[in-house]
Image (spheres, rainbow, N blue to C red):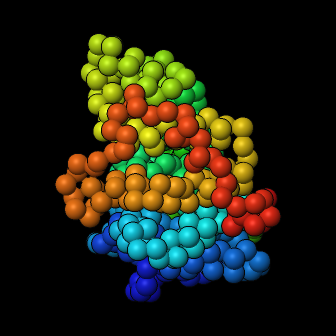
Amino acid sequence: MTELAGDVVAQVRGRVGCITLNRPRALNALSLGMVRDLMQALLAWQGDERVLAVAVRGSNKEGPFGAFCAGGDIRFLHQAGSTGNPEIEDFFTEEYALNHLIHNYPKPYIAFMDGIVMGGGMGISQGGSLRLVTERTKMAMPETAIGLFPDVGGGYFLSRCPGHTGEWLALTGDTIGADLAVALGLADGRIALQDQAPLWDALAEQAFADSAAVQAFVASKIEANNVDPVSARAKIDQYFSLPTVGAMIAALEAAEGEWERQAAATLRKRSPLMLCVVLEQIRRARGMDLATDLRMERDMVRHAFHLRPGQSETLEGIRALAVDKDHAPRWNPARIEDVSPDMVAPFFASPWPVWAHPLAALA
């Protein structure tokens, strides 16, 4: 492997297009430039007969692997959203188009989901034909912690998790490991840490007959699954199937048990308004295909930054977490009990006519 240079390193090695996310100091958080580099590589390889499959990994400060992708560049989003930088619109439009391409890619797309896999990192892996996790995987859609919602197709893939585990992951932003990711259908299998580099190198060295052979070769390296089905599933479904977030929190707070106490405390820290928006998102998305869900999320993200001038929950959440770092967001409204349906509904009204939607071309 040549020495890595640039935030996205894309090389054809043997018959496989190999992508390394190479922005380790930011945990490979996606910038607009990275989204464009990824899209350029995937479009070029899509019709290239030399390329039978694509493999993507992250890197940490010590080298390849260790961290996949922590999400989007939230400092950029705060700066752009606060100053009216139009690149914020380009970022979301192009990121969601990239997510759609990955889900519909005509060749195997193999994601090595080692280390942190969150937010935008889920967006560039969930559409893969093989999603590989390790004992080091830390997976989450933590957007409610910054007053946002699980985007990048999160409505689509979380709503398809068993029972109401999608609502639980979307609302709390809780982090899960490899075994639970497999059990919830958010990963296809686990490989050992020490097997990643040899497998990656083997992709460049094997004489594969076709794309199916690449897929089969990697699948053969997956460890036997001895995953205990989701241990908290009964509790998750009991509470997160309730009709409103307010009802969920009330039931959790009325219950006895450490799991319930922690879940309620987590929800109380999140933006009350955005929790209600997220619940509506997940439940709408259950009846949507991916393209429709991404168009809905594109509408929602425009509203997240611009619906209430000077009162964006997302800008406030990012400020508290990553800018001022006071971890004391001033949510508006401050309590879940004060959120009304007419505050939630505007997030689902598209600001564009159908023919002019930024993602109108997705099918």
Looking at the image, residue 280 lies above or below residue 126: above
Nearest to the observer: residue 135 or residue 270 = 270
Nearest to the observer: residue 192 or residue 250 = 250
Looking at the image, residue 168 lies above or below residue 109: above
Residue 110 image offset from top left, x and y in percent: 59, 61
Residue at 56% from the left image edge and 70% from the top image edge: 89
- Count of numbered marks: 0
Specify the quadrant of the image occupied by residue 180: top left
Residue 109 image offset from top left, x and y in percent: 63, 62
Whether residue 283 is visible: yes
Residue 176 image offset from top left, x and y in percent: 40, 41
Residue at 34% from the left image edge and 29% from the top image edge: 263
Looking at the image, residue 349 lies above or below residue 68: above
Residue at 42% from the left image edge and 55% from the top image edge: 312
Looking at the image, residue 315 lies above or below residue 18: above
Residue at 59% from the left image edge and 46% from the top image edge: 346
Specify the quadrant of the image occupied by residue 130: bottom right
Nearest to the observer: residue 181 or residue 301 = 301
Whether residue 73 is visible: no
Residue 277 image offset from top left, x and y in percent: 52, 41
Left or right of residue 153: residue 306? left
Left or right of residue 329: residue 31? right
Image quarter (top left, top right, bottom left or bottom right) of the C terminus: bottom right
Left or right of residue 27: residue 239? right
